[in-house]
Image (cartoon, grey):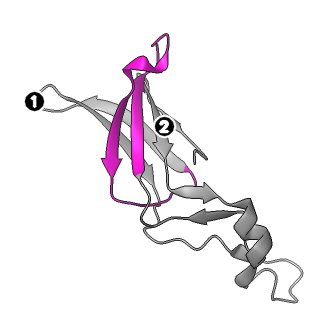
Amino acid sequence: MIHDFAMTQNYIVIPDLPVELDPAAAVKNNAHLFHYNSKGLTRYGILHRFEADATNIIWFNCPSHFCFHYGNSWDETNDKGEIIVVLHAVIFEDFDMDFGNYEHSILTTDKGSIF
């Protein structure tokens, strides 16, 4: 599933993360529509921003993880002359998408304002 993407000055970074849509299981099990497949493929596609189409996208496989959003990204050249694309994000190696089973401090307090 693609939930977010990142851009640098020269590249578009497209995450393909192992979150899957399963409407039948959601109805049958009264569960969230999406679920994280910890054994699924995680990969990132890198494409130059000025490509006319996606035929030149390069895919990189990674250990399985999930990320909601990326905080920052840039590209730089290392000492060997190689282009490095850097992403900053909080990643989850294991993720339960059934948010309804969690209590949130804002929902369990009588305080008017938490600020």
- Is 75 in front, or is 32? 32
Task: Specify the amino acid type for callout 1.
Answer: Lys
Give left or right: position of 2 versus 83. right
Give yes or no for contact between labels 2 and 1 (Cβ–Cβ under 8 Å). Answer: no
Residue 76 x, y percent position in the rendering: 28, 31
Q: Is residue 58 above or below residue 66?
A: above
Q: Which residue lies at the image location 49% right of the left edge and 51% below the top edge?
A: 17
Q: Is label 1 in a helix, a strand or a loop?
A: loop
Q: Earlier in the sequence, mark 2 or mark 1?
A: 2
* 67 part of magenta stretch: yes
Mark 2 or 1: in front is 2
Q: Residue furthest top?
A: 52
Residue 10 x, y percent position in the rendering: 40, 22
Residue at the disc numbered 1: 80
Q: Quadrant of residue 100?
A: bottom right
Residue 35 x, y percent position in the rendering: 61, 65
Q: How many marks?
A: 2
Task: Specify the amino acid type for callout 2.
Answer: Ile
Q: Is residue 31 above or below residue 83?
A: below
Q: Which residue lies at the image location 41% right of the left edge and 25% below the top edge?
A: 47
Residue at the disc numbered 2: 14
The boundaries of the magenta stretch are: 42-69
Q: Quadrant of residue 28?
A: bottom right
